[in-house]
């Protein structure tokens, strides 16, 4: 019985490998001619992400009793690639920020690093994929159009490799220490996005299941099939780093330290009022949750004449929120914890 089961397993793997070695449509894996993979030590990178907040997804979205992915810390995604990653879990989200805004320059503008690895077949790799979205206000996000030509008739099982050449505009296309690059020019027609002042970036885990109950889809409506389930604490997209190629000159957006700003009490008890005071007048104040959903704006936030604002938290559930505000030459986020 064991021999039969083992034989069946290897036959299934062989079938999957056959399906996954269809002709590549896009740039091939790192190391092959035509690849756009960017090595971590490339001189093209001018800076790295300085902030990251992760909203974890389930270890297995089809079995929520297993809980959420837990490997790594949010800070693991900050700085240059070092093999220390934060795992997003099924459908998890990482929101990344930078010291300076990213602008649409010549060629690629930033690259995202995951910890995929090659197999004995130089054309195939174990890859966990993610959608990529950008924002110039921290509120409205715009997704890069992605495409997957990986077959969706048979589930890619855990640790089965795929051909990155069948994938376009999804983070995680390349193995560890090679970033997947993105060009903001592709989003030039997005109303509400300033591609020359991108301040926030999101990576959203591709679940990878071909079951319509849990599947995620590319911009063409195709189910994206990648290794699933990865039912362990380090499951889902593993974010290592985000490297910036085209960063605006320092102080194009001032660092928060240039403006003395105080938020209190923080943490705040649900139902109480939180206050934010600044030495410059605050305006365009918006509060949003970890998923980017606006929870307070406009008349829901009281602006006072003494360069301060107040927010009542009665309608906010316990959790982490961000207050996005602008002052003179300053655009920044403050983290608020509601208990």
Image (tube, rainbow, N blue to C red):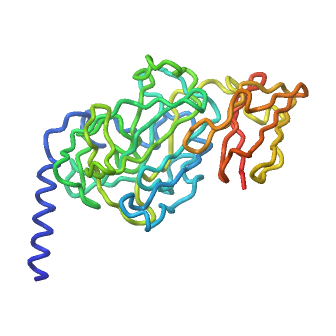
Instruction: Say which residue appears at 33% left-offset and 34% top-offset.
Output: 146
Residue situated furthest bottom in the rendering: 1
Instruction: Say which residue appears at 80% left-offset and 48% top-offset.
Output: 272
Q: Nearer the viewer, residue 180 or 272?
A: 272
Q: How many marks?
A: 0
Image side of residue 143 versus residue 223, left or right: right
Instruction: Say which residue appears at 70% left-offset and 37% top-offset.
Output: 323
Give residue 111's position: percent from left, percent from top.
45, 37
Q: Nearer the viewer, residue 338 or 176?
A: 338
Image side of residue 320 versus residue 212, left or right: right
- Figure quadrant of the N terminus: bottom left
Q: Quadrant of residue 76?
A: bottom right
Image side of residue 28 versus residue 42, left or right: left
Give residue 133's position: percent from left, percent from top.
47, 34
Image side of residue 308 versus residue 107, left or right: right
- Figure quadrant of the C terminus: bottom right
Give residue 260's position: percent from left, percent from top.
84, 35
Give residue 63's position: percent from left, percent from top.
38, 64
Task: Decide: is 233 above or below 206.
Answer: below
């Amino acid at each position: 019985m064991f021999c039969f089961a083992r034989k069946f397993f290897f036959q299934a793997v062989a079938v999957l490998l056959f399906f996954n070695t269809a002709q590549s449509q896009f740039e091939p894996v790192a190391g092959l001619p035509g690849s756009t993979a960017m090595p971590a030590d490339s001189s093209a990178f001018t800076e790295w992400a300085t902030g990251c907040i992760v909203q974890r997804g389930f270890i297995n979205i089809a079995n929520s009793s297993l809980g959420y992915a837990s490997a790594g810390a949010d800070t693991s995604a900050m700085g240059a690639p070092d093999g220390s990653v934060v795992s997003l879990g099924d459908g998890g989200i990482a929101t990344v920020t930078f010291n300076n805004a990213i602008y649409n320059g010549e060629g690629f503008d930033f690259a995202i690093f995951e910890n995929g690895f090659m197999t004995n077949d130089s054309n195939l790799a174990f890859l966990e994929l993610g959608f990529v979205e950008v924002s110039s206000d921290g509120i409205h996000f715009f997704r890069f159009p992605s495409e997957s030509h990986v077959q969706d008739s048979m589930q890619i099982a855990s640790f089965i490799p795929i051909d990155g050449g069948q994938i376009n505009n999804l983070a995680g296309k390349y193995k560890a220490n090679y970033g997947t690059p993105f060009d903001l020019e592709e989003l030039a027609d997005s109303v509400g996005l300033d591609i020359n002042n991108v301040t926030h970036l999101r990576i959203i885990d591709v679940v990878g299941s071909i079951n319509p109950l849990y599947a995620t889809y590319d911009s063409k409506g195709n189910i994206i099939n990648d290794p699933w389930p990865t039912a362990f604490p380090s499951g889902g997209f593993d974010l290592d780093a985000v490297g910036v190629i085209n960063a605006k000159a320092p102080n194009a957006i001032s660092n928060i330290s240039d403006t003395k700003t105080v938020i209190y009490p923080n943490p705040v008890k649900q139902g109480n009022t939180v206050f934010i005071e600044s030495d410059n007048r605050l305006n365009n104040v918006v509060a949003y949750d970890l998923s980017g959903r606006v929870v307070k704006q406009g008349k829901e936030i009281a602006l006072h004449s003494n360069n301060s604002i107040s927010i009542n938290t009665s309608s906010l559930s316990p959790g982490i929120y961000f207050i996005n505000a602008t002052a003179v030459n300053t655009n920044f986020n403050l983290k608020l914890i509601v208990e």
